[in-house]
């Protein structure tokens, strides 16, 4: 009986939150920018663009120098962030066309579904690019399954990317501004409708393509894929950043009294780069710099909203990017010609699409005033870890069969030492690479044909962060160990115990 009373007393104590601070669930905002490289913002060394808001976030928070997107391109990177699973394990998670089916199975435990379970209201605003619906989606009907079916309470998205049709926003299950009298048709094979295309009517383009991007013209810009109809629903590229940040701030305002999680995936700085007139020619490195400054404006708008609503100390605000930088990505927008000494990947080799560090090592800033001490962290972490880390912050258990590669790095995120980060990481850009200690192992992985072990690469990042010197021949034992460890992790289907 006495034991029983003791137990009841103990449970009551736990129930009232006897350990105060840790129990307060922070709001969580992830601002995931697109194609922003390690060297693209001021606090990571950029000088030809001005990013005062992102720099201020870094000054009041923790700036990571070895944080990674899970892959060097959009779709797999976002798949991993939301599922806690390395994208290389998932067939069909390469860069998707704009009419692809949803690649995250409804019902599986995801980052948003887990937080929802922990009592959070979850919102998704911005670029999706994870597919929508099932086969042959009708854009004029309910569009599902999508974000709402994988754990978000609210969504306002661009279905794929800015350079792909359909060029419309989808709010929850419907195209915004759809007109039944002007039905939307989308095709990635044969042309639909008879609208001008970049290939046939280049004279109508305000932004010419440098590669591809020559199908249907929307807002004077050739896209990938064909669309017809939905004239009133089409976005204006110049306004996308403003529309998205307005929706994000509205979500924050609406849910300010509950714990909320907002995934704000900006269109900036993906192509086509078409800044609002107030940012056009605002930087010293061309249009790519202008959209970086526009992105910085969006980050500032979110920070301002948090301040106005007195949510700063209740909110963990993350800023990062879905993969490394790219300069010419298919439009002749002068980005390459106007770089003016700007170095998008900073000190690292490679860029978007690349297995070298520039492909996935990205800006990553965590700010939570009063909880995260300002500073710089060298801890190794990856966006695939956000799921387990947020689960810990929200006080909910990550089920054994969910987020197989997501490690709880709460300690590192809150300012722990380097050792509180990952001790290994698989990097992905088509092929794989393996990080452990100072070493990075890049097994030869041709697109076709058998790999040639003589072309394996090994770098010591502590001595050679720019991956200039392949030392595989000098360290055969390291190559063997790392190769076996990578193979084990690949085969086991999971990273966490
Ligand atoms: Ca991207």
Image (spheres, rainbow, N blue to C red):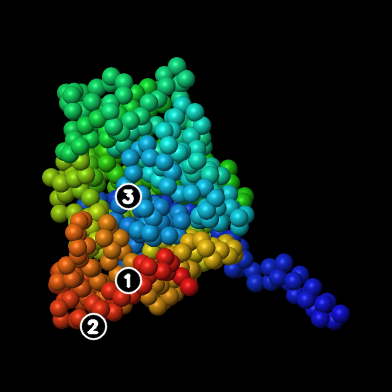
Residue 350 as seen in the image, left or right of residue 86 = left
User: Quadrant of residue 291 in the image?
Assistant: top left
Which residue of the protein is positioned furthest toward the right in this rendering? Answer: 1
Find numbered disc 1 in the image and state the secondary structure of the residue it sits on.
helix
- Give the residue pinned by disc 1: 486
- Give the residue pinned by disc 3: 94
Sequence order check, earlier mark of 1 and 3: 3
Query: Which residue is located at x 27 percent, y 56 percent?
Result: 430
Query: Which residue is located at x 15 percent, y 81 percent?
Result: 474
- Give the residue pinned by disc 2: 477
Query: Which residue is located at x 27 percent, y 66 percent?
Result: 433
Find numbered disc 2 in the image and state the secondary structure of the residue it sits on.
helix
Sequence order check, earlier mark of 3 and 2: 3
User: Quadrant of residue 436 in the image?
Assistant: bottom left
Q: Is mark 2 within 8 Å of ligand 1?
A: no
Q: Position of residue 394 (x, y in %)?
A: 57, 62
Assign the N terminus to one quadrant of the image: bottom right
Q: Position of residue 252 (x, y in %)?
A: 53, 46
* Count of numbered badges drawn on the protein: 3
Q: Is residue 410 visible?
A: yes
Query: Which residue is located at x 40 percent, y 45 percent?
Result: 130
Distance of mark 3 from mark 2, alpha carbons?
33 Å
Residue 350 as seen in the image, left or right of residue 150 = left
Q: Is residue 244 visible?
A: no
Please name whichever residue, 197 or 320, is drawn nearer the observer in this view of the structure: 197
């Amino acid at each position: 009986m006495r034991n029983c009373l003791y137990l009841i007393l103990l449970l009551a104590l736990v129930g009232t939150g006897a350990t105060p601070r840790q129990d307060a669930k922070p709001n969580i905002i992830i601002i995931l920018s697109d194609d922003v490289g390690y060297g693209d913002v001021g606090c990571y060394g950029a000088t030809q663009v001005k990013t005062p808001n992102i720099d201020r976030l870094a000054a009041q928070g923790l700036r990571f120098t070895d944080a990674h997107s899970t892959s060097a391109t959009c779709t797999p990177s976002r798949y991993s962030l939301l599922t806690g699973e390395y994208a290389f394990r998932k067939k069909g998670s390469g860069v998707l066309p704009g009419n692809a089916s949803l690649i995250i199975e409804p019902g599986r435990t995801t980052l948003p579904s887990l937080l929802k379970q922990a009592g959070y209201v979850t919102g998704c605003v911005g670029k999706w690019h994870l597919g929508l619906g099932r086969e042959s989606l009708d854009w004029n009907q309910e569009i599902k399954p999508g974000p709402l079916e994988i754990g978000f309470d609210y969504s306002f998205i661009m279905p794929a990317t800015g350079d792909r049709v359909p060029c419309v926003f989808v709010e929850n299950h419907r195209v915004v501004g759809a007109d039944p009298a002007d039905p939307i048709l989308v095709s990635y094979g044969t042309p639909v409708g008879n609208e001008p295309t970049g290939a046939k009517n280049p004279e109508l383009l305000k932004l010419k393509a440098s590669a591809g991007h020559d199908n249907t013209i929307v807002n004077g810009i050739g896209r990938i894929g064909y669309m017809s109809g939905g004239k009133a629903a089409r976005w204006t590229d110049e306004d996308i950043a403003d529309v998205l940040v307005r929706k994000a701030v509205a979500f924050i305002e609406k849910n300010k009294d509950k714990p909320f999680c907002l995934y704000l995936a900006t269109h900036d700085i993906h192509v086509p780069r078409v800044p609002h007139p107030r940012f056009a020619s605002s930087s010293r490195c061309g249009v790519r710099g202008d959209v970086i400054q526009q992105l910085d404006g969006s980050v500032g708008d979110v920070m301002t909203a948090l301040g106005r609503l007195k949510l700063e100390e209740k909110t963990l605000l993350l800023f990062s990017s879905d993969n490394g930088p790219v300069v010419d990505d298919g439009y002749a927008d002068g980005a390459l010609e106007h770089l003016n000494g700007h170095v998008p990947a900073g000190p690292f080799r490679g860029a978007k699409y690349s297995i070298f560090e520039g492909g996935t090592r990205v800006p990553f800033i965590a700010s939570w005033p009063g909880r995260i001490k300002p500073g710089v962290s060298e801890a190794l972490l990856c966006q695939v870890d956000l799921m387990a880390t947020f689960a810990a912050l929200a006080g909910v258990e990550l089920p054994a069969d969910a987020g197989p590669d997501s490690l709880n790095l709460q300690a590192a995120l809150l300012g722990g030492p380097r050792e509180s980060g990952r001790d290994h990481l698989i990097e992905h850009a088509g092929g794989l690479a393996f990080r452990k200690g100072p070493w990075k192992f890049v097994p030869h992985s041709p697109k076709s044909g058998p790999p040639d072990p003589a072309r394996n690469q090994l770098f010591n990042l502590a001595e050679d962060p720019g991956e200039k010197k392949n030392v595989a021949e000098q360290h055969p034992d390291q190559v063997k160990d790392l190769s076996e460890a990578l193979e084990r992790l690949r085969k086991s289907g999971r990273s966490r115990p």
